[in-house]
Amino acid sequence: NAGVTQTPKFRVLKTGQSMTLLCAQDMNHEYMYWYRQDPGMGLRLIHYSVGEGTTAKGEVPDGYNVSRLKKQNFLLGLESAAPSQTSVYFCASSSRQDKNTEAFFGQGTRLTVV
Amino acid sequence: QQPVQSPQAVILREGEDAVINCSSSKALYSVHWYRQKHGEAPVFLMILLKGGEQKGHEKISASFNEKKQQSSLYLTASQLSYSGTYFCGTPLSGAGSYQLTFGKGTKLSVIP
């Protein structure tokens, strides 16, 4: 059981380049989330989705776009990367059947923008 | 708004106890606790719900004071495996909210 899988695990971008981070889950979860983690800042929600075809903004959405074309996948895009987007990105998913249930996190993507 | 955690860091010897606090400026309907080991993903520990229901870890206990908008995580007889950063999360948009906002974390180091 793979759980939540993030691709890639590491990436270095030049300022202004674009890229897409892929998150895939095999637990048939309705809810999916993208967080970023910076030293001393904890986990901050970027965008989230409550189901296929839906997305919504979280706490720090600027500079990012997302898409949920398939239930199992949640993509995070950076159109024009900036050094401030250097971070570790975590995807997570959870079930709609019980709102008060655990979220499962992927292993993270370490992104460096130079 | 992110919940506030305290302390920011704590160092324990094996067998000692620790308390990690989480407070919010907004009304709390639930508090979620996660632990993250260095270089790994956060892992679920427990959820505390309004009304006293608790789901999660067998060896870690927690309290939830709705009136004070606070939760505390109690780590007793600490083991080396308890080392990591602990995060509390609270619903971002109120009672029906499933997306969480997390505190900045408490780094716990357990030494022999």
Image (tube, rainbow, N blue to C red):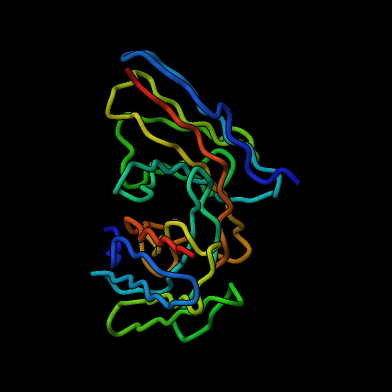
Residue drawn 56% across and 30% down? A22
Residue closest to the far right: A1
Say above or below: A18 vs A10.
above
Q: Residue at x 40, y 24 (%)?
A: A78
Give the farthest residue toward the left. B25
The residue depicted at 68 percent of the width and 46 percent of the height is: A3
Q: Give the image quarter of residue A13.
A: top left
For the residue pair B100 and B56, the one nearer the viewer reads as: B56
Residue B11 lies, with reference to residue A85, above or below; the image says: below
Q: Is residue B73 left or right of residue B27?
A: right
Q: Nearer the viewer, residue B63 or B111?
A: B111
| Image quadrant where residue B55 sits | bottom right
**Figure label count:** 0
Say whether residue B85 is left or right of residue A8: left
Q: Position of residue A45 (x, y in %)?
A: 39, 47
Q: Position of residue B65 (x, y in %)?
A: 35, 84
> Is B40 in front, or is B95?
B40
Quadrant of the rendered image containing residue B81: bottom right
- Residue B71 location (% of width, % of height): 37, 76
* The C terminus of chain A sits in image quarter: top left
Image: B56 above or below A73 = below
Determine the residue positioned at 50% across, 43% down.
Answer: B39
- Residue A67 lies left or right of residue A81; in this view the side is right
Q: Position of residue A69 (x, y in %)?
A: 59, 32
